[in-house]
Amino acid sequence: MPTKNIMIFIVILFVISFLVIFFITSSNYYKECDNVVNKELDKNGIEAAKKEHGCNEKYSF
C-alpha cells in the first residue's frame, strides 16, 4: 500500500494537470475567431478587398 506522501503527491499532480488543461482550453477559445473583410479604395479608385483573420487568443501553444 502506498504511503501517505505518495498519495498526496499523486493528488497534487492530478490537480495541477487538471488546472493546466483548463487554463489552456479557456485561454485559446477558437470559436471567437473570425474572418474580417475590409474594403478600401486604392489611389486609382479601384475597390480592393483585404481579408484578415481576427482571433482573440491570449496565448499560442
Image (spheres, rainbow, N blue to C red):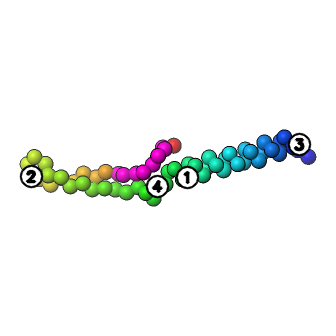
Residue 6 screen position, x and y as percent: 83, 42
For residue 12, side relative to residue 35 (left or right): right
Residue 56 screen position, x and y as percent: 42, 51
Whole-number angstrom distance, CA of label 1 to CA of label 3: 34 Å
Tag 2 secondary structure? loop
Residue 7 screen position, x and y as percent: 83, 45
Which label lies toward us, 3 or 2? Answer: 3
C-beta proximity under 8 Å, tags 2 and 1: no
Q: Magenta stretch: residue 46 in it? A: no
Closer to the chain start, of discs 3 and 2, is 3
Closer to the chain start, of discs 1 and 3, is 3
Q: How crowded is mark 4: few (under 14 residues within 10 Å), some or many (20 or more)?
A: few
C-beta proximity under 8 Å, tags 1 and 3: no
What residue is disc 2 on? Answer: 45
Q: Examine the residues drawn in magenta and state their main secondary structure.
A: loop
Q: Residues within 10 Å of mark 3 (few under 14, many from 20)?
A: few
Residue 40 screen position, x and y as percent: 18, 52
As drawn, the label of residue 30 is 4
Amino acid bearing label 3: Thr
Whole-number angstrom distance, CA of label 2 to CA of label 1: 45 Å
> Which residues fall within the magenta stretch?
53-60
Tag 1 secondary structure? helix
Residue at 46% x, 55% y is 30
What residue is disc 1 on? Answer: 25
Amino acid bearing label 1: Thr
What residue is disc 3 on? Answer: 3
Q: Residues within 10 Å of mark 2 (few under 14, many from 20)?
A: few
Whole-number angstrom distance, CA of label 3 to CA of label 2: 78 Å
